[in-house]
Amino acid sequence: MSMYILYGQFKQYADKKGYQLLKEDYRFIENNIKHLHQDEQILILKEYLKRWRQGMMEGGKTPQNQNLGRFRANEYLRSVCKN
């Protein structure tokens, strides 16, 4: 499966579930995981969204929690990829 297909499926899934990822988020993800094997990428993407959701739930449902979710997810990605 190519990177484009993987990210296309990931984007569709994230949009469907209500995550509001920006172009910059996708670019950040790609820059951090493109060197990894596809199986690792999939596991990291699943955990990334899990961390995003957990961050959003920390303070109730407010628009600011998308940013907290983004922060938690990106923090996770930095810790596992260490580019």
Image: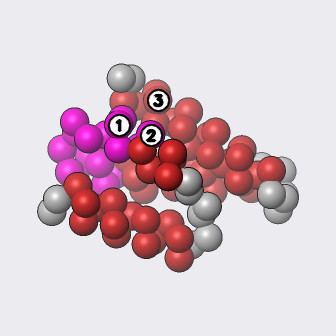
Mark 2 or 3: in front is 2
Residue at horizontal 56%, vertical 56%?
A: 21
Q: Position of residue 9 (x, y in %)?
A: 34, 69
As drawn, which residue projects farthest toward the left?
Answer: 1
Quadrant holding the C terminus: top left
Q: Where is residue 16 shown, x and y percent of the image?
A: 53, 76
Say whether residue 19 is left or right of residue 67: left
Residue located 51% across and 47% down the image: 25
Q: Is residue 53 above or below residue 82?
A: below
Q: Nearer the viewer, mark 1 or mark 3?
A: 1
Point out the stretch of residues depicted in magenta. Answer: 28-43
* Amino acid at circle 2: Phe
SS at circle 3: helix
In this rendering, the answer to whether 64 lies above or below 13 is above
| Residue at x 29%, y 48% (from the top left corner) | 41
Q: Residue 28 — which label?
A: 2
Q: Is residue 34 highlighted in magenta?
A: yes
Mark seen at residue 78: 3
Q: For the residue labelled by badge 1, is the local secondary structure a helix, a strand or a loop?
A: helix
Residue type, mark 3 in image: Arg
Tell me, yes or no, if residue 47 can be seen here.
no
In primary-sequence order, the first of circles 2 and 3 is 2
Q: Which residue is mark 1?
A: 31
| Location of residue 28 in the rendering, given as x and y in whole percent from the top left corner | 44, 40
The stretch drawn in magenta includes residue 71: no
In space, the residues marked 2 and 1 are separated at their CA atoms by 5 Å
Q: Callout 3: 10 Å neighbours few (<14), some, many (20+)?
A: some
**Residue 74 sits in quarter:** top right
